[in-house]
């Protein structure tokens, strides 16, 4: 389980804060934290500077779900949430091997800097239905048609990414092709993302336009919601992994809510969605982060125990990352 893969790229995300639509008002940290699943004791611990975690309800047998909250002694506008939501942390992460923007209908030229190593080419040329790679049956057929020609694999994978981006832009979550698994089974990655989105149902009451964007997953006419699309090739523990990322955010009043969704991941896990809320408090800002990661590696026999281990590992990694990011935010102005 390469659970660290998206952590730095995913700092942008948390679960929607239910009070975020009350523009111009100081949101209540108790309300936000309670809606996610934190207790009053957690709130007090967070305001004292501790990292607190909550166990979220899993949305399926494949779901790893965690929440983290912590205090940053800066106002929300001084925390560079927009930079994060735009996915620019990919450029700063030393594990990012290459990345780029996808705009409009998308073009192969926008993926021009994507290249693959020999081991990757061999992996995709030999791809079969199963958990080693995340490919649809049609994608596997297209790779088999290359008949072992390694020189054509990079071009084919660029076409694959472009096709998945195009389908997602036009059809939203329903446009995500299932991954082919052994025995004619499939993994419905789009369904996993939909369930993760529905778990943020508090947004439906307090930020209905943002909740609609979360479920529609493309550029619906949601006032105030900004979208960005990117691709990345990421070194996940010496295993280069291809990702397609949709980041969208809304600033409303004093608060910030943003989502980073990895709607395609070529191997390691299926998809990921993180939501982040930045809420002003007297001491600065409370950052609330929730993450749902779909992986076949926690399904089946012993899934509950594997899920528990995976979630603890994820929390440890996130706390390590957020400690660095909090320090950077609080010392940005030389404080």
Image (cartoon, rainbow, N blue to C red):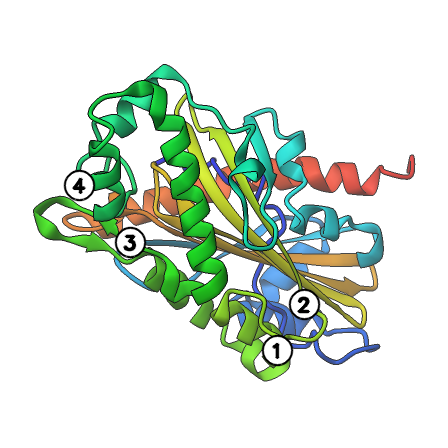
Mark 2 vs mark 4, CA separation in Å:
37 Å
Residue 335, image x, y percentages: 91, 38
Can the viewer see residue 81 in this picture?
Answer: yes
**Tag 2 secondary structure:** loop
Q: Which residue is mark 4?
A: 129
- Look at the picture and state if 128 lies above or below 46: above
Q: Are marks 1 and 2 in contact (CB under 8 Å)?
A: yes
Residue at 40% of width from left, 50% of height from top? 271
**Tag 3 secondary structure:** loop
Q: Which residue is mark 1?
A: 209
Res 40 → quadrant: bottom right
The mark that comes first in sequence, 3 or 4, is 3
Residue 277, image x, y percentages: 65, 61
Q: Mark 1 packing: few (<14 Cα in 10 Å), some, or many (20+)?
A: some
The numbered disc on residue 225 is: 2
Q: Mark 3 packing: few (<14 Cα in 10 Å), some, or many (20+)?
A: many
The mark that comes first in sequence, 2 or 3, is 3
Residue farthest to the left? 183
Closer-to-camera residue (13/184):
184
């Amino acid at each position: 389980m390469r659970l660290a893969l998206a952590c730095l790229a995913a700092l942008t995300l948390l679960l929607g804060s239910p009070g975020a639509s009350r523009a111009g008002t100081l949101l209540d940290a108790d309300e936000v934290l309670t809606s996610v699943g934190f207790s009053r004791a957690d709130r007090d611990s967070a305001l004292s500077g501790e990292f607190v975690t909550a166990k979220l309800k899993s949305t399926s047998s494949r779901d790893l779900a965690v929440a983290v909250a912590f205090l940053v002694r800066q106002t929300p506008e001084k925390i560079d949430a927009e930079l994060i939501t735009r996915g620019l942390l990919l450029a700063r992460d030393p594990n990012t091997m290459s990345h780029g923007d996808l705009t409009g209908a998308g073009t192969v030229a926008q993926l021009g800097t994507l290249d693959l190593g020999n081991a990757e080419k061999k992996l995709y040329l030999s791809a079969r239905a199963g958990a080693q790679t995340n490919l649809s049956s049609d994608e596997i057929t297209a790779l088999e048609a290359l008949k072992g020609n390694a020189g054509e694999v990079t071009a084919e994978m660029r076409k694959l990414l472009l096709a998945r981006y195009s389908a997602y832009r036009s059809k939203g979550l329903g446009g995500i092709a299932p991954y082919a698994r052994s025995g004619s089974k499939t993994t419905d990655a789009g369904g996993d993302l939909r369930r993760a989105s529905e778990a943020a149902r508090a947004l439906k009451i307090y930020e209905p336009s943002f909740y609609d964007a979360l479920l529609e997953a493309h550029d619906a006419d949601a006032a105030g919601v900004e979208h960005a699309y990117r691709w990345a090739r990421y070194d996940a523990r010496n295993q280069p992994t291809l990702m397609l990322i949709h980041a969208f955010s809304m600033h409303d009043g004093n608060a910030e809510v943003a989502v980073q969704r990895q709607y395609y991941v070529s191997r390691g896990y299926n998809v990921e969605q993180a939501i982040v809320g930045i809420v002003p408090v007297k001491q600065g800002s409370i950052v609330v982060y929730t993450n749902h990661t779909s992986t076949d590696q926690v399904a089946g026999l012993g899934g509950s125990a594997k899920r528990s281990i995976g979630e603890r590992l994820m929390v440890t990694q996130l706390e390590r990352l957020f400690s660095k990011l909090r320090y950077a935010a609080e010392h940005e102005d030389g404080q």
